[in-house]
Image (cartoon, grey):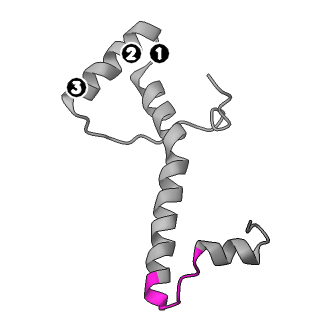
Amino acid sequence: MYYNQYERHNMSNMHTVRLPEELTQRLAILARATKRTKSYFIREALERTIEDLEDAYLAETAYEEFLKSGEEPIPLEEVERRLGLAD
């Protein structure tokens, strides 16, 4: 596994999550097979995906704000030209 920069932090926060039965079974099988806790894999899954989720929600918010602003969109070709990327 990769280096986990958060591993040293206190793990005292507890959350309750309801999981579908199939996911619960898969998690239990994985935990038994690897001799790791289910909490370990739940934490791993969150750490691997939370940044993508944050980015997606921030992008969605920025897009909604842009739509509300009434600004005119700039075509990709124009952006490329302004940045000196046009062919």
How packed mark 1 is, by other alpha carbons closer than 10 Å (few <14, some 14-19, many 20 or more), is: few
For label 3, the SS is: helix
Q: As drawn, is 27 to the left or to the right of 72?
A: left
**Magenta portion: prevailing SS class:** loop
Residue beneath the point at 51% across and 31% down:
44
Q: Measure the C-alpha gap from mark 3 to mark 1.
A: 19 Å
- The one nearer the camera, 27 or 63, is 63
Q: Which amino acid does label 3 sit on?
A: Glu
Near mark 3 (Cα within 10 A), the count class, few <14, some 14-19 or many ≥20, is few
Disc 2 on helix, strand or loop? helix
Q: Give the range drawn in magenta.
A: 67-75
Mark sitting earlier along the chain (3/2): 3
Q: Mark 3 points at which residue?
A: 22
Image mark for residue 36: 1
Marks 1/2: CA–CA distance: 8 Å
Dots 1 and 2: beta carbons under 8 Å?
yes
Instruction: Tell me the element at label 1.
Output: loop
Quarter of the view holding residue 4: top right
* Residue 32 image offset from top left, x and y in percent: 38, 10
Residue nearer the viewer, 6 or 54: 54
Discs 3, 1 touching: Cβ within 8 Å: no
Residue placed under numbered mark 2 in the picture:
30
